[in-house]
């Protein structure tokens, strides 16, 4: 949670000449997001969010990310709406970094969502899947099964220093999950990172989905598997089947799951747990002590991975 | 620039039950301030700033800091106005830390203020001095001459590792400045840290003074000396006498300086440079690599200290 690149008022003023958003009233760095530098901008015409993309987001992916938000917003999905430049451009360059201006969404993310929130978020995911179905661009999932092997190799040596037996858990899970990975599920644009951090609520209703910087094309049911990991475990590690039943049930009322998708949920969920375990482990092992972000604990996801590998069928998720 | 202590929505909701500020619409950690954790809160009734005081701000000083802002705001100074709890209390406890809610001020701080901004800020300082004159509480300046000796001793060993000759510069300056320090200047409540970061502008007008957590009782002219250091040096190290003349001239139109205050400006300015040099040097030498803040460069202030020690009289500041 940090601002990596500072933006002075003078730099902001120069930037805003290229946009039709009014005069700045307030401008604050936001301690949010581990990937980018984010700023809250209030003008006499509304509230906006300025993002400077740091090294983890490739400029080549911006037409996909920004185009997707524009596409979804045009179809009624509450997500940040990119503001185009006066010349029609989707982003600018500021302090050597690509920078985009989007609308600011009201709402608050929850640390401890309950089953009602899980249902609202599950339904929002299904609506996002439907709205994204006709989006023209595509982006492969860099953190799908094809990307795991490299992370498994790079984290093997340090894994047991984080948790005894972790190297073996990862190696065994990796080969098993890849071998069972389903090939033919319905697919399209997925969010791929829809944690509670990335869903804004007003009371019990979803007021916004944010942070589309892992969005890609992959199996829709994998997005649901990410959410089972992100929304349905308690802080003591226990899986809350009421929440998962609520989340999946609400998703299915918007978009029905096929028999193949349901059957694949355990391996997809184990794969999602492995994906977050690997990236958190890599970040922990390669943490720059000068970085302004504290790495998250990978062990939350080793526990979740073990849980999903014991699941025999999707009924255990409350279906 | 960081948020040290996280506040969940659920914790926010519980906190807000004790205040009459409406329903939360948005809540974001702000990457601002090296001392505390700050959050932007938008409710259906307005915009607020929530501060959790980390270890550097003592709870015993909160009646002074919050009382001062309340006092100044009641006298028309644009500064954050503390919101009292329903039970009249000035602050709450959140996650084990004292926490205060204040009004959010529009405006933007400038990285490169020009002479017009310096004048506006100088006049604002004088008005703050006048408005604070009848404030009932007092707080000694912990970072005045009595506090320097300890920092000189604690930084002596590491000083030359930061800049060759720094240890000698500090030791020599310290004894000389303390020996010449004026005892009888007009005094009252001062801000003591009025850097451009802490002054918000709307166009060329001051819309707010913020961050009163170094405020204390000391010589008014020392506050002006802090501003000469903070506002009147260019990024190449050069002193801009147009800016200082503009700043001091505007101050004097609101509150005239005595002959003794004018005569003391060089030593007060050297003292202010020494104070920021010492704290920055201490922070650099004792930097915790796990901290979420990058220490500022102390050498900006060794250059300024050398400059002020060469100043023969206040005419060199443009008076």
Image (tube, coloured by chain):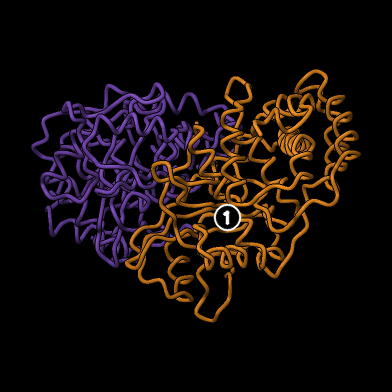
Chain colours: A orange, B purple
- Rendered image quadrant of residue B21: top left
Report whether B272 appears left or right of A169: left
Chain of the residue under the numbered disc 1 shown in the image: A
In the image, A291 versus A120, the foreground residue is A120
Image: A257 above or below A78: above
Image: A214 above or below B72: below
Q: Quadrant of the N terminus of chain A?
A: top right
Report whether B256 appears left or right of B318: left
Report whether A189 appears left or right of A293: right
In the image, B28 versus B207, the foreground residue is B28
**Taking the image as drawn, is residue B225 in sight?**
no
Horizontal and vertical percent position of residue B80: 25, 45
Image: A156 above or below A54: above
In the image, A162 versus A268, the foreground residue is A268
Horizontal and vertical percent position of residue B157: 56, 27
Dot 1, crowdedness within 10 Å: few (<14), some or many (≥20)?
some
Image: B32 above or below A242: below
Report whether B304 appears left or right of A94: left
Q: How many marks?
A: 1
Which residue in the protein does label 1 denote? A127
Q: Quadrant of the C terminus of chain A?
A: top right
Residue at x-position 49% and y-position 24%? B154
**Residue extending farthest left:** B134
**What element does badge 1 sit on?**
helix
Horizontal and vertical percent position of residue B128: 17, 47
Residue at x-position 84% and y-position 52%? A184
Horizontal and vertical percent position of residue A141: 77, 53
In the image, B63 versus A272, the foreground residue is A272
**Taking the image as drawn, is residue B33 in sight?**
yes
- Rendered image quadrant of residue A53: bottom right
């Amino acid at each position: 949670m940090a601002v990596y690149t500072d933006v002075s008022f003078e730099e902001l003023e120069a930037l805003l000449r290229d946009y039709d958003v009014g005069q700045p009233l307030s401008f604050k760095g936001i301690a949010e997001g581990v990937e980018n530098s984010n700023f809250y901008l209030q003008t006499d015409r509304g509230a906006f969010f300025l993002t400077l993309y740091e090294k983890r987001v490739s400029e080549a992916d911006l037409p996909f990310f920004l185009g997707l938000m524009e596409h979804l917003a045009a179809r009624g999905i509450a997500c940040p709406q990119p503001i185009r430049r006066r010349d029609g451009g989707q982003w600018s360059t500021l302090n050597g970094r690509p920078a985009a201006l989007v609308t600011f969404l009201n709402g608050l993310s929850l640390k401890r969502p309950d089953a009602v929130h899980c249902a609202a978020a599950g339904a929002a995911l299904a609506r996002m899947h439907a709205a994204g179905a006709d989006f023209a661009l595509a982006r492969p999932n860099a953190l799908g099964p094809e990307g795991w092997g490299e992370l498994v190799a790079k984290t093997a040596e340090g894994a047991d220093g984080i948790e005894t037996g972790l190297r073996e858990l990862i190696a065994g899970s990796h080969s098993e999950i890849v071998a069972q990975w389903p090939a033919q599920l319905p697919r399209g644009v997925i969010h791929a990172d829809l944690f509670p951090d990335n869903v804004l609520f007003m009371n019990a209703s979803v007021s916004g989905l944010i942070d589309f910087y892992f969005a890609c094309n992959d199996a829709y049911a994998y997005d649901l598997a990410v959410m089972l990991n992100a929304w349905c475990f308690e802080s003591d590690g226990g899986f809350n089947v009421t929440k998962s039943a609520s989340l999946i049930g609400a998703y299915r009322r918007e978009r029905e799951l096929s028999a193949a998708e349901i059957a694949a949920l355990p391996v997809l969920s184990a794969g999602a747990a492995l994906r977050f375990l690997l990236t958190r482990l890599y970040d922990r092992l390669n943490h720059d002590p000068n970085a302004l972000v504290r790495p998250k604990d990978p062990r939350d996801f080793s526990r979740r991975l073990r849980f999903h590998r014991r699941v025999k069928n999707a009924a255990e998720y409350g279906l």
